[in-house]
Amino acid sequence: MSTDTMRKLRSEALMLPEPERAELAHALVESLDAPPDADVADAWDKEISRRLAEIEAGTAKLIDRNEFKRRLQARIGRR
């Protein structure tokens, strides 16, 4: 792909609304992954079920999106 095509594609992608950019980013990252491992998928299903049970039981400590974003940025060195 030429540099100009890449610039145009990036520019157009960045103009998408945030949810659509997130969906596109997810699809691009997913396309780089190896084929799914059944054991890993099963482990994630169990982990997701465990976390949902904690939420439903009221024992999970939830944070809002802004707090999550702040913590993530602090963790990767952006303040």
Image: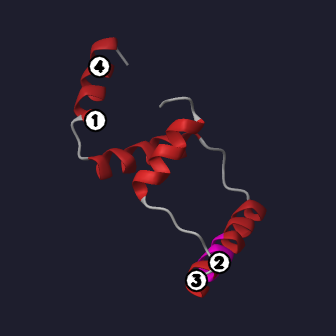
Q: Which residue is farthest top?
A: 3
* Residue position marked by numbered label 2 in the rendering: 49
Where's residue 11, x and y in %?
A: 25, 27
> Label 3 vs label 1: CA separation?
39 Å
Q: Secondary structure beneath disc 2?
A: helix
* Mark 3, secondary structure of its residue: loop
Tell me the tag on residue 58. Answer: 3
Between disc 1 and disc 4, whose residue precedes? 4
Q: Give the residue at x 38% y 19%.
A: 1
Q: How is the image coloured?
A: secondary structure
Q: Earlier in the sequence, mark 2 or mark 3?
A: 2
**Spatial CA span between label 3 and label 4:** 47 Å
Q: Which residue is mark 1?
A: 13
Whether 16 is drawn above or below 8: the answer is: below
Q: CA distance from mark 2 to mark 3?
A: 14 Å
Q: Position of residue 39 (x, y in %)?
A: 78, 64
| Three-letter amino acid code at the position of disc 4 | Arg
In front: label 2 or label 4: 2
